[in-house]
Image (tube, helix red, strand yellow):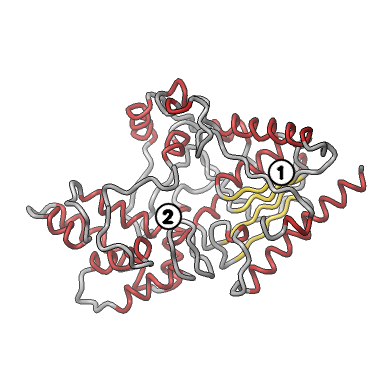
């Protein structure tokens, strides 16, 4: 956005989502209870954006200026929904890596983890098999008497582990996020990582002799995610700081953003199902609320999306990279001449939103060029109508 704004002589406005960053409606008490947190939801956030944009345009005497909204990931969902809900405020939306179909039964529940697994499998079958086999070794280890002491040593933890589940989650997070941010250039979106980090992880696993345990090989690979900069002497596995402010997202997943996920036998993660009652009980214990699993599809749609949006939607770009596991919940086919799906085989999580670099591959340069051309077309149409 910083790269293309000058081309459009555009004012760039970043609107902070309520209950994140410094936008706390009840100050320090914002997260105190469900009574205050009840105001944290996507519909309220969209209304905030509508009020702010309208007010800002009046303040800068620019009421005739067109607005295009941009968002990646959850922000991409918001961008697409904003265009559908407030077409009189935004003339178009670029929704990058927006999994608007990740709800209800719109896609197979195993899609996300199948996609993560495929990323690793495509690089190296051995790498995929080592990670897949590491969970059983971790499980077997947990039954041993000195399991936690041994695990703490293997995982080079700063403090002794209290649970084997912490080690499992630590590995799990590394593999999932690395697949998501498998960018073609060096980046530090979640953590500092090299270009194509999935390949680098698999290279680490494939280089270690097969006599080493699968768990130790998986740990060494996962360390790339947490310590590529080599600044960590030990790992804070049970005391990781919430650097991205994700605790607000926990509330949202317990209320409206219910995205059922399972692990199939094809996945490199242990097979698992989705038990709504169990999930709901966890939410009730944590927040005293029950999730609404059908609310998003009721509020924003999703069923028969091709036919529905073809009849009434317009001017949305859905951009997805197939390396990104969230792409499986995205719109991957054109819906109409103005609701366009731009899909790249090697793209990762909203890679198009990253600033341009000299090392960008041709497909990424071309993707951004297509987006700019489509946005320019929307603007031309808007000014022609004006």
Q: Nearer the viewer, residue 155 or 259?
A: 155
Farthest residue, direction left: 145
Q: Nearer the viewer, residue 335 or 187?
A: 187
Q: CA distance from mark 2 to mark 1?
A: 28 Å
SS of the residue at dot 2? helix
Q: What is the x, y in percent for residue 27?
A: 47, 27
Disc 1 crowd, CA 10 A, few/some/many (<14, 14-19, 20+)? few
Residue at the spot x=65%, y=70% of the render? 363
Q: Is residue 145 left or right of residue 255?
A: left
Q: Does the rendering let one see residue 298?
A: no
In the rendered image, the quadrant that contains the N terminus is: bottom right
**Which mark is nearer the camera, 2 or 1?**
2
Contact between labelled residues 1 and 2, with CB atoms less than 8 Å apart: no
Q: What is the x, y in percent for residue 304?
A: 65, 42
Residue at the spot x=21%, y=55% of the render? 158
Report which quarter residue 91 is drawn in: top right
Q: Is residue 104 left or right of residue 381?
A: left
Q: What is the x, y in percent for residue 364?
A: 64, 68
Residue 386 vs 133, above or below: the answer is above
Q: Nearer the viewer, residue 237 or 262?
A: 237
Instruction: List the residue tagged with mark 1.
Output: 307
Q: What is the x, y in percent for residue 286?
A: 34, 30
Instruction: List the residue tagged with mark 2.
Output: 113
């Amino acid at each position: 956005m910083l790269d293309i704004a000058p081309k459009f002589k555009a004012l760039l406005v970043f609107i902070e989502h309520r209950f994140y960053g410094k936008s706390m409606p009840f100050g320090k008490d914002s997260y105190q209870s469900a009574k205050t947190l009840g105001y944290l939801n996507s519909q309220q956030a969209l209304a905030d954006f509508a009020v702010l944009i309208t007010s800002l345009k009046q303040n800068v005497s620019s009421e005739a200026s067109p607005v295009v909204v941009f968002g990646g990931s959850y922000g991409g969902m918001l961008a697409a929904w904003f265009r559908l809900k407030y077409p009189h405020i935004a003339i178009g939306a670029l929704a990058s890596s927006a999994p608007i179909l990740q709800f209800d039964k719109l896609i197979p529940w195993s899609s996300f983890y199948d996609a993560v697994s495929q990323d690793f499998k495509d690089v190296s079958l051995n790498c995929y098999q080592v990670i897949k086999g590491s969970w059983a070794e971790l499980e077997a280890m947990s039954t041993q008497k000195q399991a936690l002491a041994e695990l703490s040593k293997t995982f080079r933890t700063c403090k002794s582990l209290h649970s084997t589940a912490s080690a499992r989650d630590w590995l799990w997070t590394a593999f999932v996020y690395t697949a998501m941010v498998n960018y073609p250039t060096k980046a530090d979106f979640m953590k500092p990582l090299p270009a194509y980090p999935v390949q680098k992880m698999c290279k680490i696993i494939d280089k270690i002799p097969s006599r080493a345990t699968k768990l130790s090989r998986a740990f060494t690979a996962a360390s790339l995610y947490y310590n590529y900069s080599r600044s960590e002497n030990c790992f804070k596995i049970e005391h990781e700081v919430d650097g991205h402010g994700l605790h607000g997202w926990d509330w949202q997943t317990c209320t409206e953003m219910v995205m059922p996920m399972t692990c199939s036998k094809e996945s490199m993660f242990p097979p698992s199902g989705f038990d709504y009652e169990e999930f709901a009980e966890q939410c009730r214990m944590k927040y005293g609320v029950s999730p609404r699993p059908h609310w998003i599809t009721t509020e924003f749609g999703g069923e028969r999306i091709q036919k529905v949006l073809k009849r009434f939607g317009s001017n949305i770009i859905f951009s997805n990279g197939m390396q990104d596991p969230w792409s499986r919940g995205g719109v991957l086919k054109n819906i109409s001449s103005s609701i366009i799906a731009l899909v790249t085989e090697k793209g990762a999580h909203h890679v198009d939103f990253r600033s341009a670099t000299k090392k960008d591959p041709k497909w990424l340069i071309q993707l951004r060029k297509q987006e700019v051309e489509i946005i320019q077309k929307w603007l031309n149409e808007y000014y022609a109508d004006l």
